[in-house]
Amino acid sequence: MARLDRAPALSNVCSVLLLLVAFFARTSAAAPDVIPKMSIERVTSAHIFELVSEGLYTSNDVFRVHKNFVAQVSAVTSRTLPFMSVAQRDLANQHVPLEVQEGVRHYEGAVSMGRNDNPNSGTSSFSMLLGAAHHMDMKYTLFGKVTKGMEVLHKLETLPTKTEGIFVMPLERIAILASYWYCAHGPLHLHMAGTEECKADLEDMNSRFSVLSGELEVARKKCLPT
């Protein structure tokens, strides 16, 4: 799940606030027609969670905005600041396998892993679907769903763009000012080393989110046109 809470500044610098919200298919948090409960362990979900936990999407950007198709986030290795440690860069360069299942469809609001021609080449780039794209079904890993903020994503479609090869890209950089996660639907089910040690941190983050969510709502009402 991803949420964009801040409208882009359409006249000057384009910026958004990206909230990545525990978007794991295993939690069945998404609508069943988009992300049904998977019968396999979700490598992609755990990988993206680690990237978010390391703060690697902060200062990244949405490099692609193709109307009625996708808004795509750049690979985190493309950002210049803040600098990544060796361990973070190794994590960012890890490849995840293609994870598909019959019945999992690319509808508007789905979150889909980016990759190149190799189906097992996904690293950190992902797309948020601006419309149905069923030609991607069974070819790209779906691991989440936008739960709130689709109106902001659609506002990105009004930005001036240019076409470079297959990519439709905004003329101005759409920067991700901050990224973080919280547990939106019950306990977080992860199977990663050290998960048990993070329970106290999770409780602390949930507490902080209860405060931040109010601030985000105020910012949303202030920045989004009524």
Image (cartoon, helix red, strand yellow):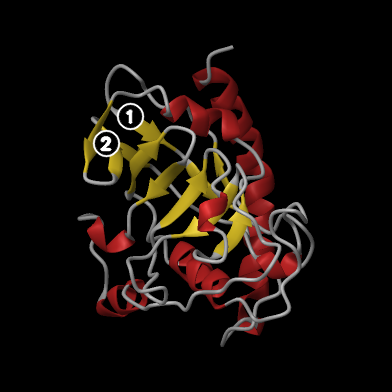
Q: Give the residue at x 67% y 65%.
A: 25
* First-in-chain label (2 vs 1): 1
Residue designated by label 2: 173
* 221, 76: nearer the viewer: 76
Q: Give the residue at x 47% y 40%.
A: 69
Q: Position of residue 171 (x, y in %)?
A: 23, 30
Amino acid carrying label 2: it is: Arg
Residue designated by label 1: 14
Q: Position of residue 6 (x, y in %)?
A: 49, 31
Quadrant containing the C terminus in the rendered view: top right
Q: Position of residue 99 (x, y in %)?
A: 56, 74
**Neighbour class for label 1 at 10 Å: few (<14), some, many (≥20)?**
many
* 52, 154: nearer the viewer: 154
**Neighbour class for label 2 at 10 Å: few (<14), some, many (≥20)?**
some
Please report contact status of discs 2 and 1: CB closer than 8 Å, yes or no.
yes
- Secondary element under disc 2, as helix, strand or loop, is loop
Q: Can you say whether 147 is above or below 149 in the image?
A: below
